[in-house]
Image (cartoon, rainbow, N blue to C red):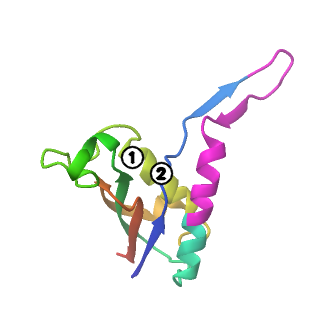
């Protein structure tokens, strides 16, 4: 088993968009947020390698807990500035989608922890608010 934490605001895998210009034989496929996603994916791969990740054969289990930054409205004001309100939510239920966050992890660790992300046979994930944004990842062979 390997576990590691990647600090930073989690970025989802973008949606692929394809287009063809007149006269082209093949479509051009682009990711809609590649400029944000690539550095985040690189940080995930780098942190996994620093944590001692090795290539796994066979089925793999991934557990990921995403910690999203809290909104300003979650905190009090005046004397209670910096104190989280009692009614502030714990679970992050807005974009980005949890499945796109997981897809980014799976793609980032391809060639580092597994040969192909099809080896990921079991996934457990959550998305909550935190003062320290990032993702805690656990990977184990099944």
Task: Work out which quarter of the rendered image holds the C terminus and state it.
Answer: bottom left
Neighbor class of circle 1 (other Cα within 10 Å; few <14, some 14-19, many 20+) is few
Is residue 137 shown above or below 21? below
Write down the residue under mark 1.
99
Give 136 or 80, whichever is nearer the viewer.
Answer: 80
Q: Is residue 102 magenta?
A: no
Q: Which mark is residue 103?
A: 2
Which residue appears at 21% of the width and 51% of the height? 79
* Residue 94 position in % (x across, y down): 33, 37
Does residue 114 appear left or right of residue 111 in this picture? Answer: left
* Residue 141 position in % (x across, y down): 39, 77
Q: Is residue 60 visible?
A: no
- Highlighted magenta segment, given as a residue range: 20-43
CA–CA distance between discs 2 and 1? 6 Å
User: Residue lying furthest left in this view?
Assistant: 86
Task: Work out which quarter of the rendered image holds the N terminus and state it.
Answer: bottom left
Does residue 128 appear left or right of residue 13 in this picture? Answer: left
Is residue 24 shown above or below 115? above
- Are the residues tagged 2 and 1 within 8 Å (C-beta)? yes
* Residue 5 position in % (x across, y down): 44, 71
Is residue 133 shown above or below 142? above
């Amino acid at each position: 088993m390997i576990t590691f934490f990647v600090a930073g605001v989690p970025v989802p895998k973008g949606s692929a968009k394809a287009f063809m210009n007149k006269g082209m034989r093949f479509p051009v496929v682009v990711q809609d947020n590649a400029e944000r996603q690539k550095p985040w994916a690189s940080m995930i791969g780098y942190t996994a390698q620093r944590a001692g990740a090795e290539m796994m054969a066979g089925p793999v289990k991934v557990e990921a807990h995403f910690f999203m930054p809290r909104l300003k409205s979650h905190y009090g004001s005046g004397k209670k500035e910096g104190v989280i309100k009692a009614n502030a939510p714990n679970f992050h239920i807005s974009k980005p989608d949890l499945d796109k966050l997981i897809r980014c992890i799976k793609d980032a660790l391809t060639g580092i922890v597994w040969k192909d992300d099809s080896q990921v046979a079991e996934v457990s994930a959550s998305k909550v608010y935190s003062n320290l944004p990032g993702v805690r990842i656990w990977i184990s062979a099944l």
